[in-house]
Image: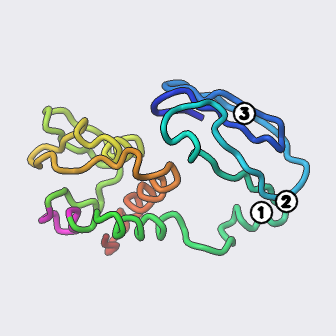
Amino acid sequence: MTSEDVIHDFFVPAFRIKKDVLPGRYTSLWFTATEAGRYHLFCAQYCGAFHAGMGGWVIVMQPDEYDHWLNGEAPGQTMEETGASLFQEKGCANCHLPDGSGRGPSLVGLFGRPVHLATGAAANANEAYLREAILNPSAISVAGRAPVMPSYQGQLNEEQILDLIAYIRSLREEGKQP
């Protein structure tokens, strides 16, 4: 676990576990759940204006149910499908046209390739680069492009960011369009 801003606290009351989540540092926590169910988790360290909204769920499954989920047999959309929906919903498709004619660069085939930055440096378009491009685009302006990409910091949760990255990564495939 890591934090992008301030100290947070991963807390699952039903398991009686709590662990600090620190900016710029990775921490981990291990526990064994003894009963299947859905357990509330939240931040137990006052961290700012949106502290009350920092919550989620730990879902504990029986081993056979977990195996089905792990093999992708769970109902619902894949990360790529969810990311594609977010890509449309957030208006990304308006600027990132497949032929590169939009205000932003084409994302088709971008993942894993070098990107030439306005500073003259090059960066690899990996998960870290895409995360930074989504959350802090002014920090990595692409050469030949006006820095018009808005920041999605605070507008997307971690799961949505991962879904968008999965979708952009899937655009490597021949014929797949945003």
Q: CA distance from mark 3 to mark 2?
A: 21 Å
The label on residue 95 is none
Q: In whole angstroms, how far apart are the C-alphas of marks 1 and 3? A: 22 Å
User: In the rendered image, which residue does mark 2 sit on?
Assistant: 63
Residue range in magenta is: 95-102
Disc 1 crowd rating (10 Å Cα; few below 14, some 14-19, many 20+) is few
Badge 1 or badge 3: first in the primary sequence: 3
Q: Main secondary structure of the magenta part?
A: loop
Left or right: 21, with 121 as reference point: right
Q: Position of residue 147 (x, y in %)?
A: 15, 45
Mark 3 or mark 2, which has the lower sequence index?
Answer: 3
Q: Are marks 2 and 1 in contact (CB under 8 Å)?
A: yes
The amino acid pointed to by label 3 is Leu
Q: Is residue 125 left or right of residue 75?
A: left
State the SS at label 1: helix
Q: Which residue is mark 3?
A: 29
**Residue placed under numbered mark 1 in the picture:** 67
Q: Which residue occupies the foreground of this view, 108 or 1?
A: 1
Of 176 and 82, the residue lying toward us: 82
Q: Residue 17: percent from the left, percent from the top?
A: 79, 34
From the image, state whether disc 3 or disc 2 is nearer to you. 3
The amino acid type, in three-letter code, at marker 1 is: Asp
Q: Residue 23, position in %: x, y?
A: 50, 26
Residue 61: which quarter of the image?
A: bottom right
> Which residue appears at 48% of the width and 67% of the height?
82
Q: Quadrant of the C terminus?
A: bottom left
Relative vertical location of residue 95 with respect to residue 111 in this rendering, above or below: below
Going 47% across and 56% down the picture, which residue do you hit?
160
Which residue sits furthest right? 34
Residue 98 forms part of the magenta stretch: yes
Residue found 83% across the figure and 41% down from its top = 15
